[in-house]
Structure formats: C-alpha cells, structure tokens
Image (spheres, coloured by chain):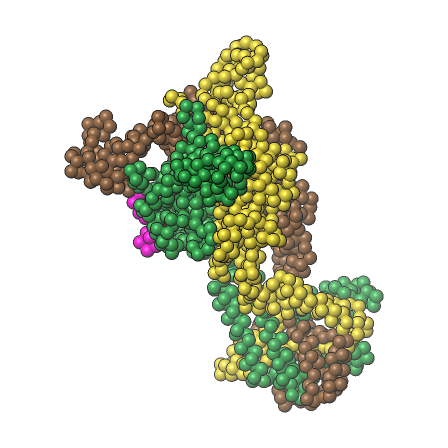
Chain colours: A yellow, B green, C brown
Amino acid sequence: PACYLRKMGFRDCLRSCFLGFFEYETPKVMVVKNRTLGVIYRGVHLLVTTYFIWYVFISQKAYQESETRPESSVYTKMKGTALLGDMVQDMVEYVRPSEGGDVISTILRREVTHDQQQGVCAEHYSVPKANCTSDSDCKAGEVNFDGNGPGTGRCIPYYNHTFKTCEIKSWCPIEEFAAVRESALVEAINFTVFIKNTIHFPKFKVLRGNIKPNKARYLGRCTYNEVTDPYCPIFRLGYIAEQAREKFSELCRTGGVIGVFINWKCDFDIDPSNCVPTYAFRRLDLRKNLPSSGYNYRFAKYYRRNGKEFRTLIKAFGIRLDVIVHGHAGKFSIIPTIINMVTALTSVGICSVICDWILLTFIDKNEVYSERKFDEVSEESPPPTLTEFTLTSYGSTHSDLSEGVAL
Amino acid sequence: PACYLRKMGFRDCLRSCFLGFFEYETPKVMVVKNRTLGVIYRGVHLLVTTYFIWYVFISQKAYQESETRPESSVYTKMKGTALLGDMVQDMVEYVRPSEGGDVISTILRREVTHDQQQGVCAEHYSVPKANCTSDSDCKAGEVNFDGNGPGTGRCIPYYNHTFKTCEIKSWCPIEEFAAVRESALVEAINFTVFIKNTIHFPKFKVLRGNIKPNKARYLGRCTYNEVTDPYCPIFRLGYIAEQAREKFSELCRTGGVIGVFINWKCDFDIDPSNCVPTYAFRRLDLRKNLPSSGYNYRFAKYYRRNGKEFRTLIKAFGIRLDVIVHGHAGKFSIIPTIINMVTALTSVGICSVICDWILLTFIDKNEVYSERKFDEVSEESPPPTLTEFTLTSYGSTHSDLSEGVAL
Amino acid sequence: PACYLRKMGFRDCLRSCFLGFFEYETPKVMVVKNRTLGVIYRGVHLLVTTYFIWYVFISQKAYQESETRPESSVYTKMKGTALLGDMVQDMVEYVRPSEGGDVISTILRREVTHDQQQGVCAEHYSVPKANCTSDSDCKAGEVNFDGNGPGTGRCIPYYNHTFKTCEIKSWCPIEEFAAVRESALVEAINFTVFIKNTIHFPKFKVLRGNIKPNKARYLGRCTYNEVTDPYCPIFRLGYIAEQAREKFSELCRTGGVIGVFINWKCDFDIDPSNCVPTYAFRRLDLRKNLPSSGYNYRFAKYYRRNGKEFRTLIKAFGIRLDVIVHGHAGKFSIIPTIINMVTALTSVGICSVICDWILLTFIDKNEVYSERKFDEVSEESPPPTLTEFTLTSYGSTHSDLSEGVAL
C-alpha cells in the first residue's frame, strides 16, 4: 500500500497498512427520488437479470462445463442379397470398402466392360480429333487428355462400323464402346446397414454406445424406426433415402452421397443412461440440378488367361454413406458457474451507465442532481470540513483499497 | 457530451467539453472502520485473487492464445511374417486397406470359403422356412432376408446329409456350410505397426513430427516403450492390446477396434522441441459383455477358371486400429492476457456487493452507515452547501465522464 | 430487500420496499481538476475504446455468432492416361482407393515382383544371420523378424549366385531379389484430380459447394488457376506439387503425402454467394532430410494357374492427397453483440483503477484528494448532518439497490 514514506515514518507506515486491514470501503451513493428514473432503472435491471437467468443459465446451461469433441468409433456392416439378371449379388459384391469404417458405399448400378486387355483399338468417335479418313489424320504417340491412350498413327474402322477413327494403344475394347449397362439393383432398397457407434467423453470418463446391452437377439430382427425401434441402429437403405428426401430410383440412376448424422446431446447431471443418440440423414453432394452431381467410381477385377492379364472394368454408381458423429456433453462445474455469476452481476452495472446518462441529460433540470453527485476539487481546495478532520495518516492507506471499490 | 445547449450558449458548451478533458472523476468512498467487515472483505479479496492467479493464469494458462485443431497427417505401416498352417503370411495378406491411412486393420483369424461360384445349392438349415420335405414347401423366387438367395422352388438333400432344405440361387457352396475356420494367427502378437504422425499448427507456424531427426537407423531396430524408447513410434500389437487392457487371445477370437490416441500438448513459450506426443490406447467398440462386440468383415478374391468366375470368400476377424490425434498448443499473447486481467480485476467488484449487503443488513445497527453512505435527493432538495457552489455549468459535462466510473 | 423487521413494523417494511422502486442510486463522484490526470484518464480511455472498436468488433467480428465445424463432404476423382513402357496406364490402375473419398493416392512408381507363390527359396543376404556355408548355420523354423519367413534349416545357393543363404518358407521369389523397378510415371504431372466439396453450416442452414451451378460443360475443360479459374476444382498434379513447393521428380522417387486444404471463410451478413473457398497445398509428411520420409505401400494382385495361387506383389510409391476442409462462418447475432458491449464498457473501469492509484500515490501531495475522496466512519460517528435527517427507515432499502451500483 502507498504510505507516503517521505512524509510519515516507517513505523507509521506499517501501522497504517495494518489498520487498513480492518477497514472496509463502500462508494458513497446519491439516492434520487425520481419515479421515471426508478422505473427505467428497475426495467433495465429486470431485462439483464431475465437474460442471464433464462438464456444463459437455463437455456445455455452456463453452469456446466462442456465437452464437444468426444472420441468416436464407427463400425458399419451391410446385409442383403438380391437377384441381378440371373446372378445373385450379396454384400461382398456390392460393398466397398469392405473394412466397415465410417465411410461405406454400396453399388446400385454397374456399367461393366468385360475382358479388357492391353492392345490397340479404335478411339471413341466422341474424342476430339479422333475421327479420321486416312492415317495422315492421326499423329503417332500423341496422347489426347480426353482420350483413352496414345495414338499409333493409323486410321482404322471403328469396330464393326463403317466410319473410321484413329487407332490407340489402350485397354481394349474401350469402355465407351464396350461397356454393358446393367439394370439397377432396385431390391437394394431393402438392404440394411448396421451402424455401431461408440462414443467416449474423456473429460467426464463416460463411455456410451448406440446399442442397448443384452439385445443380441433383438438386433438380429429389428430395423430402425424413430418411434417403435429407436435403439436399433439397423437402417433400411430405403428409409435412409426417404429421410434424406431423395428418390431411391433417382439414386440408383446417378448415385449419391448421403450423410448419416449421429447426434449425442448428453447432460451428465442426470443419469448418463438417458444419453441416447438421435439420427439424421441428409444428402451431402450437390443437388441434382447442379453439374456433376451423383456418385460413381471405377474399379477393375484382374485375372489371367494363359499368361495374359485381363481386367473387367466396372463403373459403379451407388450410395456412399458418410457417418458423421456430433457429440456434446455437459456437467455441473463450480468454475463456469462462478464466472457466469460474476459476469451477470457485472453486467448489471450497465443499468447505471444508461440511467446516469438519462438522469444528467434529460431529467436533471436545474442541475440539482449533478451538483450533489459531483464534488469538484482543485489543488487549492477549501479547508477540510469537520468530519474530514478524522482523516489522519491513515488517509493514505485508502489509496490501494479504493481500487477494489473503483471497479 | 451533454451540455445543455438550451441553457448555455454554444461557446460555453464547447468550453465545457474542452475543460472536461482536464478533469478526472473518482467515486467518493465511505471508509468503515469495522474489524469484522474488514476481515470479510480481505477474505473474499484473497479468494478471488487466488483463484485468478492460481487457476486461471497458472493452471489454465489464460495468458496464452491457444490452437486446438491442428492439421495432422498419419501414415501407418505394418511389419511381420508368420506361419499359418504351412503357408507363410506377410503383411500384404493381412493388412487392409493397404494404403496406410489413419485406419488400418490386421487380420488375425479367417474363415475361408473356397471356390464359390454362381449356381444353385441347398440353403442352410438354420434359415427360417428353409427346411423342407417336398418341393411344395419351397416357394420359387422367394428371397429370404436372412437367407443366401432366392429359392428355386425345389427341395433337395442338404449336401451329403440325409435331411433336405430348399434349393436356392446363390454363390455355392454357401458359407455357413463350406467355410473353413482357420486357426488364429497368434504370432501376430509380435507384429509391429509403424505410426508416423506429422502435425502442423497454422496459427503458430510450427511443424512437428513424432520421429526424431537423424534416427533412420534407430527406427530400423526399436519398438516403442514409454520409458526406454519414447521416440520410437513402432508398436508391438501385443503392447497395444496390453495397454488397451485386452487379452490378445480374446482379440484373435472376436476381433476388436482399438483407438490409438496421439496427444500433443505444446507450450510454445518454451522451446518447441519440447513438444512431444504421448500415446494412449483404448478399446473403442463395445465391451465383451455387450452384443455384437468385436470386429469382422468379409471380402473375396476373384479368379477365373476356363471362363467361369470363382471367388474365395474370406470372413476376417482382426484388430482395427483407429489413429486419433489430439493437439493443443499455446503461446503467450497480449490480447487474452489483458482480457483476463480485466476480468480478474472486475471480478473483485463482487467483494463489494457481498460486503455492502453484510454491512447494511447485519452490521448497520443504528443505521449510521447507511445514513452516511446514502445521500437522498429529491426535486425539492435543500440549498446546495458551500463546497457545491464550486459546481458551475461544467457540472453537466460530468454526465458522460461518469459512465466510466459508474462501471 | 433488507428492511429491519425487528425495528419497524411489517407494514413499514412493505412500504419501504415499494417506495424503493421509485428511487435511483448513482455513486457520488469527486471531480479532480488536474491536467495530468485528465490526460492520462482520457488516454487509457482511448486505448481501451480503440481496442474494442477496432480489434474486437471490426477485426474479430465479435458481433457475430460463429460456426467453426461445418459438415463437409468430399468426393475426388482422378483423370489421365499415360504410357509406361508399352503399357497404357489409366486411373483404374493408378488410383487407390477407388471409392473417391477425402484421401486418394495415385501411384507414380512401382517395384513389381511377378509371379510369387508359396514355396521355399533362399533368404536375402542382407538379412542378419541369413548367410551360411552349411545347413548347421541355419535353424529350422526360426522366424527372423527382418526376414521373409521361417527357415527350413537348409543352406542353399542364393539363386544363381555362388554364395549361399539359408532357405526359408515364403512367397518366392523374395521381393528384394526379384522386384523389377519400373520407371516413374513422369506424365502423371499432367494428371488431374477433381475435388468436389460440399459444405453445410447447420446453425445458419446454409449449403455451399465449390462448384458454380450451370457449369457442367465448363468443368469438362478447365483446370484450376487461382487467378483465371478460381471456380474450377480440377487440379493438375504438377500444380499441386508446385504449390506445395515440392519437386515432382522428387515425389516420383520417394512419394509423399500432400495436404489439400480447402478453407471456407464465410460472412453471412453479406450474400452467401460471396462465400467461396480458397485452396492451399502443403506437404504433410516429414521433410526429405528426415528419416522414413515419403509415401509407399504394398499390395498384391492374386490369380490362379491350374489350381495354384500366384500373386504379383507391387510396392507402390506415389502421392497421397489428404483433403482437409476448414470452415468458419459468422452471422450477426444480438446476444454476442450485447455481451461484448458490456465487456467493453466494463473494461473501461480499468482506467479508474489506474488513475486512482496514480492520483493517490503520486499526485496527491497534501492529501487534499484523499481527504475529500474518503469519508471515514466508525461506530461512534458524529451526529448526522442536516441533509441526512431526510434519511429515515427507507435507508435500509438502499442496501440491496446499492449492489447494482457497487459493481
């Protein structure tokens, strides 16, 4: 504490500090008996209080410390068989990748190019500069970015057609010509995907899963339904598409990426067992009316015939499910509670600012208020009045105490 | 500033504003010489200060600006060979997917169904309604969801058994009948997984990796050990299982998903080279006593024999490692420091609230305090006292200044 | 409100509470006419105000509520063909995994081991303890961790060389001996990757994509260029490498992991259509001068020849692209605005603390200020002065009101 050593001795100084410990300071206050102002003051008061009690504490749960990035693990598995042509297709054929992570795609339609092999064949006519009448039209070794391979320089008949295109080195026959467009796997609408999600809140040491214990037999039969089977994380593809507001037939045609959102909103002030997830589904890729919508990819199966490598090229259209987990957990904690209480009380100060301004600007007619509120002092101030004589060397000690109050 | 233009001329007004610039306002304070109150006041004071200095600044490092979502890159690679039956299995056989991302699974046990091909065969007897005595029991074309394919309508002997089941179109023979259960790859306990993790804090422009430079040779030999080899991110599967408190033999049987947590907690006020990760392991899928625990998936290898497609169906049980990276970095920054200082000082105001309440409610016996603290003013107030005469037209200018103080 | 029931009757009490409603309290203030102090006060004032207006509100947009973790969906597709030796390689050969998720890798160089099959062959000479002169040097069944399989116990010539190594059970021939190192696919520098990213801010219900509508034809041709084609998310591998400040030839040799950062910084106070992403590229794995840098992985193609399983083992070096999406959106909201305003006004209080301290410590020569600022009261205080007589039983009611002010 500032105790003017230069003026009083060291002992006085210590004494002042010591005595300062048994003093308390509180600002002097002017009470304005004014109806309008009182009402305004109370009004603002009420507003602030309501905001904090209702919004901050009740709706925002400011008394809780929260955890928003839990550790999550997703395991997916599809099930279902369907007849395509006279081939039976099970999930081993239709699900990629097979490992069952948080991204899983099922093939709904295929365009298959059988028995491709390295060789030379005619470029597709749609490729720029592919059409030709004589070899002179085709440059050898030229790679056309939109084409399927480098030209050989020869101009040959386009497969069994009359017109000619440049010959290219490529996997032959080229996909555009030889691809067989299979029919869509409409039965897939009944395929099911099992999504197991386990979530862990490290801060609160709580582990939760979206499967109820002792339900092994139940899981064998059920499919998810918000109302009847909320604890059965087995979803029909048809249900998912419907929830995402997409036509399944449309998805079969173009394919699409659908987000499966698992939302955990947990309040650990009540029993954790009440913490159950909700599911939401939304199409993630751009809408149909936008370009390059849909979802498709290519892969190949490789095999050999007497030493030569062949491949079956498959262009797959399907649904990709991206499982996205959101988690939020809250639990009462003393620290945030105090902090928000303080903030609340502090914010009340705002009332004074507003009312002071109103008081001194509009109400203070004949300046009676400001005269009483403000006490002007300059170096050459009038002699201290009676009461102030009580002020002695201690005066100085107030300097530091005042800080607390000034706030 | 509010300077009653209506009352004083414009020049006076300007003058008042100008003069107001060389004035300072500080609240008038009543000093209560009361032991109890003083102690209480100091007490609360101390509490608040301690909280801020110790908790907020020292333990929470509130003087730092922090970054909690760094950019992370994970690259994983497994190593090890083992003898299964008389076949040697290396990682190419056992690790899927092969690309070495942040999710990697190793196969510990397989159930292999050799040489499946499209055809007709007997449905498994466990499938509902599969058992039959005559063709009349089997509906043609009916797809049973739990079954392996659509029925042909015929009732045939169940492979080389005496009883009969309905014939189905499917990949034959069906897995349930023909699957060969291989023994577990127990040697896998000594397989190692190399987890390279690089992390980047954009805000602080710091790039860190979990490998020490110039350690190429070292990495060739070491395996991770918290104590002896903290800088060797090569983990024995056995070590991982043990850390996750799981029996490896158990994992071989059911499979499981284990989270590998890499935690970076960095304080860039000290040398970044001190910022090294810690590793933690925890099983992520639900516990053994819960249903559908474990981890398994199916995939197939395809090949052809004289034009006909065959597949080898493999049901794989194994460990899936999900590498999850958490990062938190902090560095001194002036902004948060100031903000928290202000908050701290502000919070001290809470002391006054409490003490004022105590003062005026409990201590203020004969209302001597409130009489001195509060100065009541109504429109018809007594004539201003001597000292207040010094207040002139400037009085008004205080209106705005007072705001700062009122807070 | 505390109304000393013990002293006044219940009716008085109610009355006091009621009247308290039409009163307003404002702290009494001492005005110090001191140039220095005034200037200091204004200075601090200015600083605080500037900080809040400029930094908090303008640069930090504190008046907005923000969303930092949008839902994002990434779909990637590569394109391009190149001649390797006399084989034409298209993306089906070179891209893994094929599903087109947010992690996609393209193979730039391969080391191929053809026609491996289960059998016995000589261990590589580099493996510790592999070299031998007689069978006695080789332990049967011993698995060397760095080796390719368990020993048979025999010592055989190392393929067509003169020296001998231990024989092992393995996929033969072993990779180290038989791998064929193919030349790098330098044309890959012109391959393109199409990165479609859709982003959704649930809080603001805004869905955005990185493709402009009605641009299907445009997308067929364009490649990304920050200046000329910012809306074309098709990137040349060469461009990516260059942006990541990596030599493409170097990447072909060692491979590498490159992060593709898509940053969405959206202000929904203006038209959402202005919310477009920026792209950044940075190498994510450790730098070249560090050990085990680069990116490579092994996979195999399986086939059969008269009943026997063969595999072609491929060690692939390439570029792995990790697409990482950051999103931040802000929109005006009344709550954060108010909160920050209050904080701002509150922080101004800090000025008083500083100035009070200066005032009472340095300027207050003859203690005239402290004498006027502080009014000391002890139990045995002088008789109340005239003005204070007006204070009656209501005095008590101020106790609670004062709280608001004290802050």
Count of marks, rendered view: 0
Horizontal placement of B349 versus B179: left or right? right
A370 with respect to B121 (left or right):
right
Q: Nearer the viewer, residue C347 or C359?
A: C347
Please give the range of residues in magenta: B220-232
Which image quarter: residue C318?
top left
Q: Is residue C76 above or below residue A172?
A: below
Residue in the picture at 63% in, 84% down: B362
**Residue B228 in magenta stretch:** yes
- For residue B298, above or below residue B8: above
- Residue C230 drawn at (x, y percent): 60, 35
Residue at position x 55%, y 25% from top?
A: A180
Q: Principal SS element in the magenta part?
A: loop
Q: Residue at x 19, y 35 (%)?
A: C154
Q: Nearer the viewer, residue C224 or B402?
A: C224
Q: Quadrant of residue B7?
A: bottom right
The image shows residue A254 at horizontal and vertical percentages of 60, 33
Horizontal relation, residue A57 to residue A89: left or right? right
Residue lying furthest right: B6
Is residue C131 shown left or right of residue C325? left
The x, y position of residue C26, in whole percent, is: 71, 74
Which quarter shows the N terminus of chain B? bottom right
Residue C47 rendering spot, x and y as whole percentages: 62, 59
Q: Nearer the viewer, residue B323 or B390?
A: B323
Q: Is residue A208 visible?
A: yes
Asked if the magenta segment contains residue B63, the reply would be no
**Residue B330 visible:** no
Quadrant of the rendering where the C terminus of chain B is positioned: bottom right
Above or below — where is A32 with respect to A273? below
At 61% from the left and 68% from the top, the residue drawn is A341
